[in-house]
Image: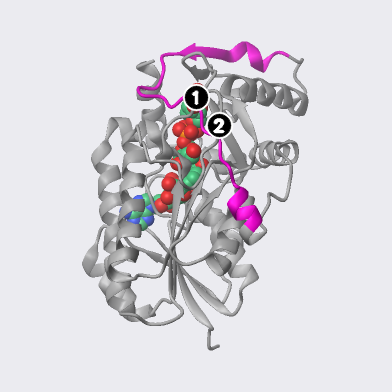
Amino acid sequence: MRYKKTVLITGGAGFIGSHVVRLFVQKYPQYRIVNLDTLTYAGNLENLRDIEKAPNYTFIKGNIRDTAFLKDLFESYRFQGIIHLAAESHVDRSIENPMEFIETNVIGTVNLLNAARLAWRGQEGCRFYHVSTDEVYGSLGDEGLFTETTAYDPRSPYSASKAASDHFVRAYHHTYHLPVVLSNCSNNYGPNHFPEKLIPLIINNILHGKPLPIYGDGKYARDWLWVKDHASAIDVIFHKGKEGETYNIGGNNEWKNIDLVEKLCDIMDEKTGKPQGSSQKLITFVKDRPGHDRRYAIDASKLRDELGWTPSITFEEGFRMTIDWYLTHPDWIKNVTSGAYQQYYEKQYDNR
Ligand code: NAD
Ligand code: DAU
């Protein structure tokens, strides 16, 4: 089959990337989708089992830190589109080991920009889409929302590495006219979320009767978005976003951590047939995350008004679907939490 275009998706075996890959493979049979992922602890091909044999899908194991490998890859595939999600994504890990974040998120992104620049040389119809985070904007007070013009103020090694990569993407657009588009999204939740992150970690700990660690006073706020809605926003921005522009993506769905965890406990009790209040008894306040950002909240009105995107489901629906997914995928949880995860978890929580 002759494909209309070949699209490279990096980090497609991870949490968000797996939903983006599935959406593109199924919705665009006329595109050849190449998933490039080095399969770190967070990358898992099980996330894509259902589509791995699709004729328009190819998986390639490789590292965006490796420039020689990227050069060969770009020569072989002649990509016209790139959706770049590969990253080290966990804030706590970035506090332990910032260099990993600089090497993948900053240098890896610049390697990809260089490969695209060399391959495209002004060719029409190409697009480099950089997927980023709202954490680049820093922390909000009690009021207000992040907009696309909020000044960057990253405060963790993770967010500093993402901010640096965003700056490089814009610099390549400005200096070399590389056709780029960017988005900055709030916290995602849903299937395939690695259980080091708040929601799946709490579900997993409830299932094992372990303490539910709440950092600091628990009144830190995050704006949660159903992961498949992030994927649909990426689809819209990739196809309709204006070159050189940035779009904020969010669910207008802000929760304080403690309120979210209490709600999660109650639904877990209901679904597992335990007396109401059982899981809440596991809540344990622990030492705070260093430099913990107090509040994130996104103004996604540019994306709504200019490109017509809005979330497709309510938080109530998405949250229940997420819990159901974890309850029906014990093997997935077991596989990703075996081995190195236990050491990570114990080290992380022994210190708190
Ligand atoms: P994740 O950690 O679940 O997945 C990252 C994927 O990238 C993994 O499959 C991993 O194997 C791969 N990867 C890591 N280093 C690589 C390298 N050097 N070369 C090739 N592949 C590599 O992350 P996620 O939560 O799915 O986040 C995806 C992207 O979205 C990231 O860029 C992140 O900054 C951004 N983002 C995440 C959220 C969120 O709530 N999770 C919100 C906004 C933006
Ligand atoms: O805002 C987007 C970002 O959201 C993404 O860019 C990151 O890749 C993603 O990991 C996420 O970052 P957070 O730090 O907000 O997510 P995390 O799930 O680690 O934490 C959510 C909140 O819960 C945060 O305030 C810290 C708190 N927390 C987290 C863990 C893991 C706890 O209280 N206890 C915990 O055990």
Q: SS for tag 2? A: loop
Q: Which mark is residue 141?
A: 1
Regarding residue 335, the answer to whether it shows in the image is no
Q: 199 and 236: which one is in front?
A: 236
In the displayed structure image, the side of residue 173 where residue 335 appears, left or right: right
348 shown above or below 225: above
Q: CA distance from mark 1 to mark 2?
A: 7 Å
Q: 222 and 264: which one is in front?
A: 222
Task: Tell me which segment is drawn in magenta.
Answer: 277-305
**Disc 1 vs disc 2: Cβ atoms closer than 8 Å?**
yes
Regarding residue 296, the answer to whether it shows in the image is yes
Q: Is residue 348 magenta?
A: no
In the displayed structure image, the side of residue 332 where residue 166 appears, left or right: left
Quadrant housing residue 289: top left
Residue at 26% in and 68% down? 69
Q: Is residue 287 magenta?
A: yes
Residue at 76% in and 15% down? 276
Q: SS for tag 1? A: loop
Q: Give how far across and how far down residue 244 sits, in percent.
A: 43, 63
**Which amino acid, by three-letter code, is at mark 1?**
Gly
**Which amino acid, by three-letter code, is at mark 2?**
Gly
Residue at 62% in and 23% down? 261
Q: Give how far across and how far down residue 272 sits, in percent.
A: 74, 26
188 shown above or below 68: above
273 shown above or below 284: below
Q: Which mark is residue 144?
A: 2
Q: Pick the quarter of the image with the C terminus.
A: top left
Q: Give the number of marks.
A: 2
